[in-house]
Amino acid sequence: MMKALIKIMLAIAVGCSCPTLVKSQTKKPYFNSITTETGLPESQIVSFTQDKYGYLWFGTQNGLVRYDGFKLKNYPFKDSEGNDVDICVVKSLYEDKNGTLWAIIFDSGIYTYNVKTDAFEQKKIENEHKLYKDLDFDAKWIEDEERFWIIYNTPHINFKNPKIFLFDSHKKRVETFSAEEKGKNHLPALKQRDLIKDKKGMIWATSDSLLSFYDVANKKFTPYCLLSGLPKNTVIERMTIDPINEDIIWMTTRSHKNPDDLLYGNVVQFNTKTKQLKKFSHDKMMKASIMSDSCLLVTADSLNRLWFVTKKEFHYIIGPRIASQILNLTQTINCLLLPQN
């Protein structure tokens, strides 16, 4: 959802900066609202996805609907005994690489959408209650062959005793990794931040300034590196794999002196091969430097550009040398491209 929001904001920024588009756009944009009056079963949307056919799926705390661009269609769910699920809290929606649409319904189970019958079918999954009871809204799914890594997608300083779920759709079971678990399911983390999969297929997890990886051979998370060199009271927030260098992980940070002091910090670059850490911050003497010390998000696009979302601007870098292009949402676009090697 965050990536979709960024794409929308970028489209707005680019559109506003293009004289041709500005001249042709004489009317104010019209916003069409989807509400309970037009068919939403409940006003709060807690999960969302778009499938391969272009349909939009909205999960609420009291039902699921599909939007085809014109109207909404409601989809009921049956429990294990064939009865209607009265209070249908759609915790998570996800379409996998094979086009299968998954839905996690609180206190009911895990379901998949059957295109032929146009209905959702419940799956019998071992330990599924661990997933549909303990998983919070805004879940992040990571595909790993026939397995899915699922975590809570909103890192927070006070989010203690986190859980990472491993859902094996082939073996039909759910495993939980957390600081409270013993043995191989123990997670070396009291405050989980993020989980990613690199181009080599390795799963990485962050907790404060600790970087861990999933050891496939031993089937457990193993501490890899304590990221020293960061300012005091700094924690790793989110991670992004570099689209060109598979050994590089980009990370956003947060700085806090107490639990209520949540401040976004610098962006850092970590080389998993050399364990070298680089910090990037604003330098007023360099026009090509990042324009803010407060980085909220780093994301890669289809052109292998890395976008850095700060409180004021968007930035991106290209190629082996850092180049910066600044998209200021309140001004026109200013470009500065450094020569490439």
Image: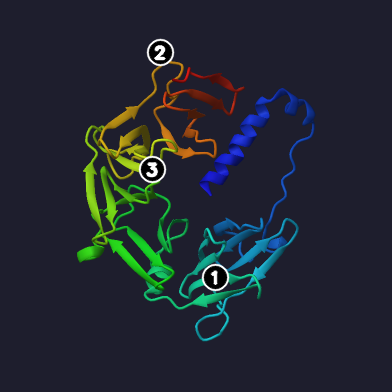
Q: Which residue is mark 2?
A: 285
Q: Which residue is mark 3?
A: 239
- In the displayed image of the protein, which residue is found farthest to the bottom? 81
How many neighbours does mark 1 have within 10 angstroms: few (below 14), some (14-19), or many (20 or more)? some
Query: Which amino acid does the dot numbered 2 rest on?
Result: Met
Q: Which residue is mark 1?
A: 112
Q: Decide which of tag 3 and tag 2 comes sooner along the chain.
A: 3
Cα gap from disc 2 to disc 1, whole angstroms: 55 Å
Cα gap from disc 3 to disc 1, whole angstroms: 29 Å
On the question of residue 270 being in view, the answer is yes
Query: Which amino acid does the dot numbered 1 rest on?
Result: Thr
Relative to residue 28, is residue 197 drawn left or right? left
Q: Decide which of tag 2 and tag 1 comes sooner along the chain.
A: 1
The quadrant in which residue 250 appears is: top left
Q: Residue at x 37, y 25 (%)?
A: 281
Residue 5 image offset from top left, x and y in percent: 56, 44
Q: Is label 2 in contact with label 1 (beta carbons under 8 Å)? A: no
Q: From the viewer's perspective, is the residue at label 2 or at label 1 nearer?
A: 1
Q: Nearer the viewer, residue 244 or 209?
A: 244
- In the displayed image of the protein, which residue is found farthest to the left? 183
Q: Nearer the viewer, residue 130 or 225?
A: 225
The quadrant in which residue 54 appears is: bottom right
Q: Residue at x 33, y 43 (%)?
A: 260
- Label of residue 142 in the image: none
Residue 254 image offset from top left, x and y in percent: 34, 38
How many neighbours does mark 2 have within 10 angstroms: few (below 14), some (14-19), or many (20 or more)? few
